[in-house]
Image (cartoon, coloured by chain):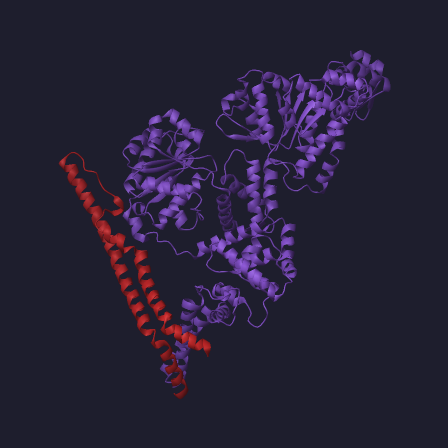
Amino acid sequence: MFMLFEFLGWWYGRGWLKAVQTARGWVREVEREFSAGILIKTLFSPWKQIVSLPGQSIDEKFRATLDNLVSRSIGFIVRLITLLSAGVLLILALILGLLLVIAWPFGPLAFVYLVFRSVKG
Amino acid sequence: MNQLNLRSLRARKARLAASLRPYVYQVSLSLVLVGMAVAAWGGWSGLNRLPFAAAALALLGLMLVFWYRLDLSQLPPRTPAASLDDILEDTLLGALRKNAPLTPASAWQAACKLWPGRFLINHLLINEAEVGQLLDGAAEDMAVVWDSARQLAEKTSAAEVDAGALAAALLTTSEAAKKYLAAHNLNAGEITETLDWQARLKRWLHQLRPYFGGIGRDWAAGFTPELDHFGVNVSRAIESGRAGHYHTLAHADILDSVVHNLSQGSGALALVGEAGAGKTSLAYALAQRLLEGRDESLLYYQLIELNAAQIISASGKELEKIAMTLFGEAAHASNVIIFLDDARLFFGQGTGAFDIGQVLMPLLQNRVIKIIAAFTPNEFQSLKAANEALAADFAIIAVKEPSTGVIMDILEDTALTLEQRDGLLVSFQAVREAYRLSGQYSQEASYPGKAISLLEQAVPYVQNQVMSAESVQSAVEKTRGIKVSKAEAPEADMLLHLEERIHQRMINQERAVKVVSAALRRGRAGVANPNRPVGSFLFLGPTGVGKTELARSLAATYFGDPRRMIRLDMSEYQEPNDTRRLLAHDAGAGQTLLTSIREQPFSVVLLDEVEKAHPNILNLLLQLLDEGQLTDESGKPASFKNAIVICTSNAGSAEISQQVAAGSSLANLERPLIDKLIAQEMFKAELINRFDEIVLFRPLDESELARVAMLMIDELNRNLAKQNVKVQLTKEALVKVVQAGYDPRFGARPMRRTIQKLVEDSVASRILSGQAKPGSTVTLDASDLQDGL
């Protein structure tokens, strides 16, 4: 009985705070794995730093500019797709986290209700 | 504070966690899955109560796993602590029974079941059952144990008292356990050291996973196909756990300096230190630190190590082009630090070297790339001499040997990497022995590298997957051909009867053989001062009385090979600048005393006619005898601590001969003769006093010369054994050989030549003429020897 009260005390006290921390951890993990910060900072950077150095003639300069534009475009597209994927996962993590935090206090109550229903029918 | 309340809430929770731990996840997951499945099936089937009961079970499983994971499995210590249970690690607290009195024996049992305790007993090779039987104290004795455990935990900077600290406290507070430790060559300090090792591992295992930058990091940097091909990405190896754990504390201050230099824009750093001082591990520790992301300006930088041999074998004549491509990629990637281990190979020094100096110099001057190169001091000096401008581009970071404590920490961390790599257990004794023996027998390299090499060499010698001190000793014995382990029965017997063995090669000189044998026994039993040569002797006596033969016998008996002898004629060192010839260490100087002793530290060093050497050299001899080492011109010591140093001299030989002829004993003659030699300034008193023994050799009489001749005939018979022919001398023949082979000026020295002329020539003629057939014995009389002369 003592442990039951201890469990309930924890569940509605530090346990709830831990649930919030866990939800935050899920969001942070997605952000870390996708390194969204770096992706945003380098969104318009050339892909893998592949750049052409401009030559002397106008033709060479034009070609280099075109190459660099292609490199940046590839970089932009790949990073954007990754960021969008990260965004989807981030939203999922947020939803799950919110569900956890909101549903948390109902856990023991739901258990009592389910037990009651399983007895009474 | 030493009150332990096993009924406290924390203790109850710890016990609950301990009982749940083995199966909590399986049970909870089963409850959730089965509960949900049954609830869904029941609901679909229109059942009334079952779906609710099943859903309740599923929810119970879910709540149980949350409670366990977020609370029960990580009970932090309570501060400020009111009682002992507040600061006991939860697993230990959970293992203590509340209904039984806690005694040292039951506490030992509890500690040994948990990994911190097991780590300690496994790595100290302690027999759990034997110690358990020794711990016969009562419950009251636990107060002292807990007190000690708390202190030990504090010493290792641990916030809690875990099973390791408890086991260590039990071992160091019980008198019986202390005796057990002493019998196993362990002491309390070493128990604490092992506990510290375990605490460091625990901290490392519990530290948060560092943030390495995610997938965006690699996409932000440049494309490096050639660098990936010719180099090893150290950062990735560390990130994936393939490169092991690097002890960033080993050179913490130097590491700070490296990071500071790189952050401030220095393009090139030269890590200058002796081989083994930790240059490579410093570079690897840098890679690890960069991955931790603490240094903002070097965020996401990667360390790539270039392999000189691979570049040469792949590039052929296009070496310069490859080098340009590699450095171009590094510059372009903007997040690469190139590491040149054994950098001399990239700057034209040594076999298989090539020179990238000209390619590199403009890049370094413009600070286009970041590069770290590892050199020994000599190698860097050579680079400076060859290309001063290039050497000036490098900021020098001196890498010195760390302190003993840090070296042990590094060795322990390395041992864990070996354990993981080779699936074995490296005991504390093995680590300690690797430190001790590498210090004693590897003079060329520095710590911790030489001790790490020895640990790695010991891997093939582990028994039952356990590396012990004996494994390390075997590695030294097999790779260096010397005995370092405790003398076993046959060897101990040999040492105890050393005089008899030496006398199989030596005639008479009883006193000389006795004092020398005693010195060897002291050295082998570990009684002698380890900071001096194993033995040091001054042999005085006439020519041809066995001084050199005794030295050779020692090399054969003690070091196992008569060729383990470094012999110098000191009459060739009479000029003041001859010290250079003695101390030179470079290849151009040829074989010198120091190069010889470094190649063969386990030798008899025989310095003939020592009195003829220049006084400067005799001063060096003082240092050698006193400190067991000499320092070469570059300041690097060469150890003589494993050598037997013998100086010979003919000084006073006339007096020895006269006195012996007059019937005086050598023991009575020794002191007056030494005083006389000092008075005559043949030797300085301080030199004489530094020898372990001054040994007088007396002239051999006729019967002894006959025995010397017989020894030589025995040697001849061993050579003839291949042809199955034996030779023997009649009494008259032997007398004739002795008369012909003795010269008052040279003692028995002409004997070998005489036997060659008289005996070997006669035997050779008989074999060639067919008179001596296989299986026959050639008996030579005095008349037979006449022909040979």
Residue drawn at (34%, 62%), measured in percent from left and top? A25
Q: Which residue is painted at 57% across and 73% down in the image?
A: B99
B642, above or below B610, in the image:
below
Residue B755 seen anywhere in this rendered image of the structure: no
In the rendered structure, the colour chosen for chain B is purple
Q: Is residue B402 above or below residue B321?
A: below
Quarter of the image where one finds residue B715: top right
Pick the front one: B5 or B22 = B5
Residue B787 locus on image (x, y percent)? 80, 11
At 31% from the left and 30% from the top, the residue drawn is B361
Residue B148, position as x, y percentages in the image: 55, 58
Whether residue B668 is visible to the viewer of this picture, yes or no, is yes
In the picture provided, is A87 more to the left or to the right than B288? left
The total of numbered circles placed on residues is 0
Chain A shade:
red
Residue at 51% in and 35% down: B445
**Quadrant that contains the C terminus of chain B:** top right
Of the pair B582 and B531, the residue shown nearer to us: B531
Horizontal side of residue B75 vs B676, given as left or right: left
Q: Residue B499 location, x and y as percent?
A: 75, 32
